[in-house]
Image: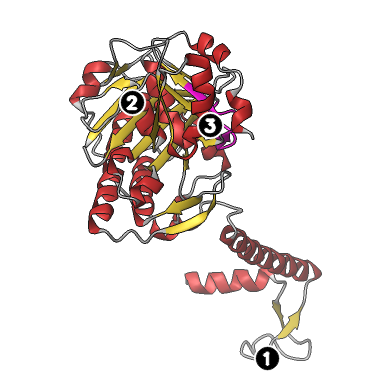
């Protein structure tokens, strides 16, 4: 009966009604029936057809747009613009724990590749100084571990890394949400900040040139977290001695400054590639007793200023760099020095912002427990030297 009623309603809605022929008697119920089309029914039918076509076509367009990332959550639940704009907050104490773990995991890859002696070394091009900008499997594999560990734990923060991240090599590397005891001891309470204010800088293998030469003591992996462009926490890990230094500004650290520094005739650690530039000006400024220590890797040079229990680590009083340098090379060291009361600025004394471009032009000067601005005034010609 329901089926008969539906068919009757469908025919009525289209204006199709049975009519008896005037020549035929009413008793011939099975006689052929005439069809009378209602103008209203035709209009309803056309509107229904247009509605069906609209929905089909709009669904087709939506599918097309999603392929280009213009609508919804294509392919894997990627957040739309509204979700991306409001990433909530992150805990810097948790970020420190994950950063330490990332630096160690990356360091494991660096060490494994170096010990295999199969580096797959290649050049990314030339540096501004004309040297080969090298990359190895150690760089690539360390970068993959470090980036995806941090990205999985904190998907809403901006991460800048030295090496290219290939989506084809994506990994889901989970963090167990355990904060090490040494961090809990120093940083006793959570420190929440807006996720959108955070920028992470990763150097998966600092001192790649020295790595290819098997000068292992210079090699580090580093992670830095900046908040509103200011370095807030830094991690420097030495894969071959398995030493890790970390610090959080206004939080705590597992490393400290040395008890004394020589400000009159300092030992100055500089890049191996341009030690001669610095030596000439340094001898003029501090006298012939000044010692220049050529070294590889920005992370190693910052550790040279600190009290590090690593026999392979040289010690210096100042760190000077006179040419262009990338922010992932220096952010972690800047954060550690800042947490310990030290300074890292351009050679003209300007603070370094860790947003925007990935490098700085003005060289750098790093010190701790010294009159930093007095040092800046003593070295007026170094920045000019670096631009020659």
Indicate the quadrant containing the C terminus: top left, top right, bottom left or bottom right.
top right
In front: 170, or 369?
369
Residue 385, image x and y in percent? 60, 29
Res 322 seen here: yes
Cα distance between the residues tagged 1 and 2: 105 Å
Question: Which of label 1 and label 3 is nearer to you?
Answer: 3
- Asked if the magenta segment contains residue 354, the reply would be yes
Label at residue 32: 1
The image's mark for residue 304 is: 2
For residue 106, which quarter of the picture? top left
Q: Is residue 281 left or right of residue 99?
A: right
Q: Are marks 1 and 2 in contact (CB under 8 Å)?
A: no
Q: Secondary structure at mark 1?
A: loop
The magenta-colored residue range is 353-365
Task: Work out whether mark 2 precedes mark 3 in sequence or the reverse, and give the earlier one.
Answer: 3
Measured as percent of width and height from the top left, residue 25 is found at 71, 89
Q: Which residue is mark 3?
A: 277
Residue 119 in magenta stretch: no
User: Does label 1 or label 2 sit earlier along the sequence?
Assistant: 1
**Mark 2 touching mark 3, by CB under 8 A?**
no
């Amino acid at each position: 009966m329901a089926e008969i009623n539906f068919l009757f309603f469908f025919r009525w809605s289209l204006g199709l009604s049975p009519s008896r022929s005037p020549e035929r008697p009413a008793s011939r119920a099975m006689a052929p029936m005439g069809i009378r089309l209602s103008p209203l029914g035709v209009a309803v039918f056309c509107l229904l057809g247009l509605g069906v076509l609209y929905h089909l076509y709009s669904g087709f367009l939506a599918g097309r747009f999603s392929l280009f990332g213009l609508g919804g959550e294509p392919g894997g639940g990627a957040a739309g613009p509204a979700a991306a704009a409001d990433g909530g907050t992150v805990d810097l104490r948790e970020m420190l724990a994950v950063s330490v773990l990332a630096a160690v995991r990356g360091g494991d890859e660096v060490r494994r590749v170096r010990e295999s002696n199969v580096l797959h070394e290649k050049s990314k091009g030339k540096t501004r100084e004309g040297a080969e900008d090298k990359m190895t499997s150690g760089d690539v594999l360390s970068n993959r571990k470090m980036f995806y560990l941090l990205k999985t734990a904190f998907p809403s923060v901006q991460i800048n890394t030295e090496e290219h991240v290939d989506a084809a090599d994506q990994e889901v590397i989970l963090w167990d949400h355990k904060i090490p005891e040494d961090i809990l001891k120093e940083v006793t309470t959570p420190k929440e900040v807006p996720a959108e204010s955070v920028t992470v800088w990763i150097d998966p293998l600092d001192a790649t040139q020295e790595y290819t030469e098997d000068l292992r003591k210079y090699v580090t992996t580093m992670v830095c977290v900046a908040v509103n462009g200011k370095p807030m926490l830094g991690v420097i890990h030495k894969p071959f001695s398995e030493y890790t230094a970390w610090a959080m500004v206004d939080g705590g650290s597992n490393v400290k400054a040395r008890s004394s520094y020589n400000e009159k005739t300092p030992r100055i650690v500089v890049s191996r590639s341009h030690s001669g530039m610095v030596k000439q000006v340094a001898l003029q400024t501090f006298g012939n007793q000044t010692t220049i220590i050529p070294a590889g890797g920005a992370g190693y040079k910052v550790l040279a200023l600190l009290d590090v229990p690593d026999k392979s680590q040289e010690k210096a009083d100042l760190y000077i760099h006179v040419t262009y340098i990338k922010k992932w090379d220096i952010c972690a060291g800047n954060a550690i020095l800042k947490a310990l009361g030290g300074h890292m600025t351009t050679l003209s004394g300007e603070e370094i912002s860790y947003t925007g471009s990935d490098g700085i032009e003005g060289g750098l000067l790093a010190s701790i427990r010294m009159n930093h601005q007095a040092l800046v005034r003593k070295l007026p010609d170094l920045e000019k030297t670096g631009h020659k």
